Image (spheres, helix red, strand yellow):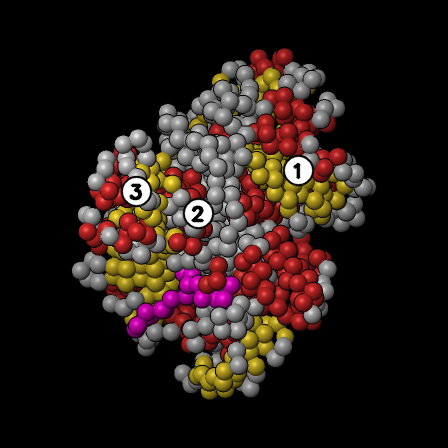
Amino acid sequence: MSRIHVTTTINNDETDYLCETDETLLDVLRDHLDLTGSKEGCGSGDCGACTVVVDGRLVCSCLMLAAEAEGRTIETIEGMAGGDALHPLQQKFLEHAALQCGICTPGILVAAKNLLERNPNPSEEEVRYWLAGNLCRCTGYDKIIRAVMDTAANTRGAA
Amino acid sequence: MPKDEYQSRDFKVVGTRPIRPDGIDKVTGKARYGADITAPGMLWGAILRSPHAHARIRGIDTSKARAIKGVKAVITRDDFTYQPEDSDMADILDNCMAGETARYDGHAVAAVAATSKSIARAALAAIEVDYEVLPHVTDVDEAMKPGAPVIESGRQQENVPKGYSENVTGRSQYGHGDPEEGFKQADLVIKRSFKTAATHQGYIEPHACLATLGSDGQGDLWVCTQGHYMVRNVCAGVLGLDAGQLRVTASEIGGGFGGKTHVWMEPTALMLARKSGKPVKLMMSRDEVFRATGPTASSSVDVKIGMTKDGKITGAAATYRLQAGAYPGGIAFLSAMCGFAPYDLENVRTEGFEVMTNRPKAAAYRAPGAPMGAYPVESVIDELCQKLDLDPLDARLKNAAREGTKSSYGPTYPAIGLEATLKAAQSHPHWTAPLGPNQGRGVACGFWFNFGGDTCVSLMVNPDGTVSLSEGNPDIGGSRASMSMMAAEELGVPLDQVRTIIADTASLGQNEVTDGSRVTFAVGLATIKAARHAVEIMKERAAMTWGIDPEAVDWRDGAAHPAGPNAGKFPPMTIKEIAAIASNTGGPIAGHHEVNAEGAGVSFATHMVDTEVDPETGAVKVLRYTVFQDAGKAVHPDYVEGQFQGGAAQGIGWAINEEYIYGDDGRLQNAGFLDYRIPVASDLPMIEPVILEIPNPGHPYGVRGVGETSIVPPLAAIANSVSRAAGVRLTSLPMSPPKVLAALKAE
Ligand code: FES
Ligand code: FES
């Protein structure tokens, strides 16, 4: 089977890989690059566990072909913390116990970070609708929403 | 009777809210779940599944699949040459890989291992199965009728009365007194029938494992499961292996809720690994999770309750019919035990029927059987209260079970917390908050047994005085944090001196699966006892050093102290000091505890919910939700609250949205998260958790399990709320917009 050579930037590192034509970005992240922080909960765009940022926009990496990543800039959960310093959202998720099993957590963190970059002062309703594409079966979302709101309030306070 | 373990004390660590030890790995993407691991030379497995609800397999031609380059193994049932004697094991084998008959849409019929995912997919497409389609039945009431297509003959137990299809495999009965007499004393008797749809646990992580198995019978399995000892024992039993030769390691687990207390495909992965001679990774797609792993049972229930004008229940009866799916088993008996368990009743009788259908084998789902046990009962109690103009909390308090009550399923209760949850509900501001038009408030109670079971814990005091704790139960929602906290509490050391890990099956004795809300209770109890064991050893070492009697040594604040009149004056020896000289005082220091934990302590909750019904569309919006539940003692309150909130959210999904929808062809029509809609963030309000602490006499710190009870009351609480908001009683779940609209129109 012929493969496609792709050059891209992932979490600020220049990366290249060979992929099959039917492989998704999620397949490549997980199976070729060992970036297993992005999870496959459904493979059909319905759960958000595979959420990454491509050129500043949230994308379900299970719905994007790996070949389409040529020349793009991709951010995954693995790029969220700066060295050993957690991103404020990551810290607040820990403090609020916003995860139980944690399988949804990477996707939700990536999505929440993207929200706060666009809207540093979201209402509870805005957070709930922004995260409506990220399923969590464990928490009932309560502590997740609180963690995001608290991060936003803290970041505003610090600014 | 389990002994009284509880001792009141002032806690230093237990009851605080530290950050969980596995937290950083989970917020940075480093945590390794079932599908997140690879092995050198690994192959990709895939499973071919029946598209038919019921079909005889006349033959399977795998020759074209085998001929594809990169295909390293193709297996069918013929490759499983070991035939288990035990009927449970035989059923699990048949469910993992169909024998002569495919029993449901999604039943596995063949599997492959190949060098890439795409080759594995191509190989599945090249397998030719010759099916003879058979008549099927997927509805529980239809399946019970004589003349219904029979899923498997010869599985009916003797306790099933005549006149039913062979699909009815078992019947159970509980209760005492005479309900008919009780109904005569009532001022109002209501009899109604209810239905609930099958719902899936809906964990976000699909099943996944990585298997190796050599021709010498030695194997390793990495798997996301609620119980890796169970996986080991079942795989060994199904494949005819020695359990000791198979080492199973539990990955991080992305949710389970009961659905990962079963074996669905791990023997297949092992068989592919044996046949190919390579490690094989096998993962389910979401479609496979829905079609082939157990949802919980759908139910059909008749309930009849009589009440006096002042709210006393005089008679109660219920018949539960639950579909067990394609194999015998089932949980109707649990519904029949749980339905009336919150109440102190003179006349109560229940019966449960277990019914086979052409659906996937039903699996445990959070307090299995209890939600559909409680829903009809709590609905009829609510209707009685409406018609008799009674306060639904007062009426429940009037009938509430207490210490000394003979329960509807047999045992007499010790100290329990139902009354406390009802009283907390009464005095909560939610109860008296105003409601708007088209809004209603519902309440309901729920019960769950809780469980203890086989448990092993090992606690090592390291040479530097830090502590390593090994337990054998996968941590689904913060249990490593709770174990470290209980160990730190008991040893009197700072929490950061303790690290808890989940040991593999070769490193620690047998452990029951993470089920029955058992872990914080049973593993916690074993952790405390293991710590006490280590403390005894450390006291001996200190006594030896001081040349005094071990009885003359006290342990407090993480150090040995001389105590009593003849002990002498020695400065305390800390755990660090004792550990440092352990080699010279007898060798390494470790405590351990092995137990079949009893005294789990039953659990009760009361839920309160406000909903608004849109009269135009029939859509139900949940506006406010409060959970009142007894935790015995909340070790880490954040994760107790999380259990309350998560169970309530799942119950909301069950009540309003979620259902398995089968077509006339017997195929599942909504095997994906788009069409099987679990609650999303914008569907829900904040869920307020109110923790009550009525100590469990069976645990040293008073802990009760909390994981399951929270899914028991929501079905009825929401149905009661919607019924009051809509002015019409709803008797079928889910209360989806078309059903609510139809009920409104019929009114
Ligand atoms: S795996 Fe991509 S949305 Fe679910
Ligand atoms: S924490 Fe388990 S799915 Fe969200």
Which mark is nearer the camera, 1 or 2? 2
Give the class, few, some or many, for how many residues have Cα within 10 Å of label 1's Cα (few <14, many ≥20). Answer: many
Q: Identify the residue position indicated by label 2 in the image.
A: B485
Q: Is residue B408 left or right of residue A118?
A: left
Q: Tag 3 or tag 1, which sits nearer the N-term?
A: 3
Specify the farthest residue to the front.
B569
The residue positioned 48% from the left and 43% from the top of the image is: B12
Quadrant where the N terminus of chain A sits is bottom left
Q: Amino acid at mark 1?
A: Met
The range drawn in magenta is B27-53
Q: Identify the residue position indicated by label 3 in the image.
A: B570
Q: Is mark 2 within 8 Å of ligand 2?
A: no
- Residue B507 position (above or below residue A156): above
Asked whether the residues under marks 1 and 3 belong to the same chain, the reply is yes
Question: Is residue B372 shown in magenta?
Answer: no
Asked whether the residues under marks 1 and 2 belong to the same chain, the reply is yes
Q: Amino acid at mark 3?
A: Phe
The residue positioned 57% from the left and 83% from the top of the image is: A72
**SS assignment at label 1:** strand
Give the class, few, some or many, for how many residues have Cα within 10 Å of label 3's Cα (few <14, many ≥20). Answer: few
